[in-house]
């Protein structure tokens, strides 16, 4: 599901308009003020599979410090979700 605007909650859910949806994994491509991820220089810090400091939330694109192309970041995340180490 691709969502343009949402509020991310601490209980593994997001609010979209008047709906509350729970998630197992979340991939974000922008900063959310209420999401307490580790940041440095307005970039979200991620590990080698682009997971943030919050389990099962991944950050892609310009909001992380990676120089890896976006399509490779997405493939890395999908590979990890399908076969975590």
Image (cartoon, grey):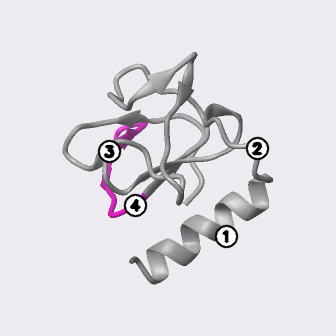
Q: Nearer the viewer, mark 1 or mark 4?
A: 1
The quadrant where residue 7 appears: top left
Q: Which is more foreground, mark 2 or mark 3?
A: 2
**Which residue has dot 2 on it?**
67
Q: How much space separates mark 3 and mark 4, taking CA atoms?
A: 11 Å
Q: Earlier in the sequence, mark 2 or mark 1?
A: 2
Residue at 54%, 34% in the rendered image:
5
* Left or right of residue 48, residue 19 in this image: left
Q: Answer with the quarter of the image where residue 30 lies.
A: top right
- Closer to the eye: label 4 or 2: 2
Element marked by disc 4: loop
Question: How many labels sit on residues?
Answer: 4
Identify which residue, 28 or 47, lies in the foreground. Answer: 47
**Quarter of image, res 24:** bottom left
Label 2 packing within 10 angstroms: few (<14), some (14-19), many (20+): few
- Label 3 or label 4, whichever lies nearer to me, is 3
Quickly name the residue at label 3.
Answer: 54
Q: Say which element carries label 1.
A: helix
- Label disc, if present, on residue 25 of the rendered structure: 4
Residue matched to label 1? 75
In this orientation, which residue lies closer to the viewer: 71 or 40?
40
């Amino acid at each position: 599901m691709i969502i343009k605007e949402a509020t991310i909650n601490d209980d593994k859910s997001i609010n979209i308009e008047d709906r509350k949806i729970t998630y197992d994994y979340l991939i974000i491509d922008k900063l959310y003020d209420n999401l307490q991820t580790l940041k440095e220089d307005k970039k979200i810090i991620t590990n080698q599979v682009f997971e943030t400091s919050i389990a099962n939330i991944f950050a892609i694109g310009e909001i992380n410090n990676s120089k890896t192309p976006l399509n490779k970041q997405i493939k890395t995340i999908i590979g990890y979700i399908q076969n975590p180490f």
